[in-house]
Image: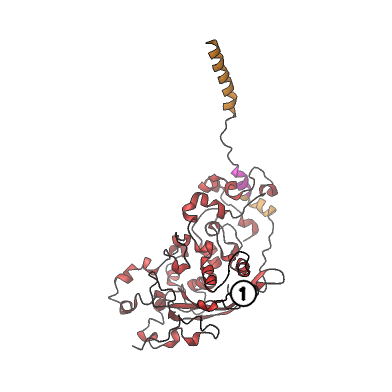
Amino acid sequence: MEVWEKVFVKDAKFAQSTHGMAGCVICHGGDSTTDGKESAHQGLVADPSEKSCSSCHNDITARTSLHATLNGFVTKLEARGGDLSEGSLLATAFDNHCQQCHTSCGQCHISRPDEMGGGLVSDHVFKPPSMQYNCLACHAARVGDEYLGNNEGVPGDLHWTRLAMTCSKCHGEELHGTEALAADRYGNSASAKCEDCHQNVLANTSNNPQHEQHIGELSCQVCHSVSYKNCYNCHVGIDDKGIPYRTTEPSEIDFNIGLNPEVSSQNPYKYVVMRHVPVCPSTWDYYGADLLPDFDLVPTWKYASPHNIQLNTPQNENCNSCHGNPVIFLTEDDIGPAEGEANQGVTVDKIPELR
Amino acid sequence: MKKLALVVLGLVLLMIPVMAGCRAAPVEQASSCVTCHSNKDLLQKTMSVIEEEKSEATSGEG
């Protein structure tokens, strides 16, 4: 997107909209009484979301969006003993490398996120997030590629390939959070669930022996998702020009069933799909040694919901696709030498027996 | 009575300029912002090129 396109309001009728009639300066500051660019932009606030939206939309902005708070990151860093207090080494690192995924109201509803270079998505019209310009700006590497079928040899999600469902068809109000700040997306009581639409699957299992046997014990993805990316060894730092950088090893496409580390009333499953996360003990070494002193308290294989749902998968071909098949389970053999202790609670020690 | 009439007249005379001075709060000239920002040619002429730097050291999935 060209620089001028980012601020181009194609349809001047915006001025007659509810937000338009409030006046540009009310939210953005600046001076609308002058024609000169420099003088008009004095005191301009490009993204006024943090202060302006709450004046009318306090019922939404007062909630606890994980996109706004990045509490999912915070939870895991603090659980590993990270000190995120103001001015700490880890807080500095967090600001340099993690905050780029922070979104504001505007970066979901009006413009592209800063991470994607900003710019109005559709004039200045306030809309649900665009899958292409908003969601995939940040969620491309894993869930985006899985959903769209961009991983070589792995089909895209049926919800996209057959129904062309965009992200907001499933992920709506949950993104604003709820009254209670969730530790992560699985702790968000409003999170999208398969049964939000597929109630009949839960209600009627009599014509499906696999459902009859396994619903409630296995997450849906255990049987209905396929291989997905797993990432390793992320390291961050500042380069010679003072620009933050990160490196990760090439991702690996794999599929592993492990033990649910976040059993709850919402997610009561014993077995879930596990994805490897790229954090390692030396991830933050550029900023200081041992910034995650309790690294082993949190698994490096996490509960995942790969967005590549299929009706028929290798797992549900027959019972012994999983039963008696250690390859499909996350076992000690799959755990790297430095990660054994961290993942003790999620590896499957006893493979379900052959049927 | 005469005094009362003079007082009333004085009040009326005072009210005239006051009421003339009452205006609705000035409506922001939003057209000034939108006038520029809906003018493609003007935006292209006045745009500032901002180089967003990504580190060459970055590699792998984000």
- Quickly name the residue at label 1: A284
**Residue A311 coordinates in the image, percent (x, y):** 39, 76
- Secondary structure of residue under mark 1: loop
**Residue B31 coordinates in the image, percent (x, y):** 60, 44
Determine if the magenta segment contains residue B20. Answer: no
Q: Where does the magenta region start and end?
A: B23-36
Residue shown at 58% from the left, 20% from the top: B13
In the foreground, A301 or A137: A301
Quadrant where the N terminus of chain A lies?
bottom right
* Three-letter amino acid code at the position of disc 1: Trp
| Residue located farthest toward the right when viewing the structure as drawn | A240
> Which image quadrant is residue A239 in?
bottom right
In the foreground, A4 or A289: A289
Total of numbered circles in the picture?
A: 1
Residue shown at 67% from the left, 74% from the top: B57
Can residue A344 be spotted in the picture? yes
Q: Is residue A340 above or below residue A143?
A: below
**Residue A150 coordinates in the image, percent (x, y):** 52, 74
In the foreground, A237 or A314: A237
Chain bearing mark 1: A
Q: Colour of chain A?
A: red
Determine if the magenta segment contains residue B33. Answer: yes
**Residue A24 coordinates in the image, percent (x, y):** 58, 47
Colour scheme of this structure image? by chain
Quadrant where the C terminus of chain A lies?
bottom left
Q: Is residue B16 above or below residue B45?
A: above
Can residue A229 be spotted in the picture? no
Q: Is residue B53 above or below residue B18?
A: below
Q: Which chain is orange?
A: B
Residue shown at 28% from the left, 76% from the top: A207
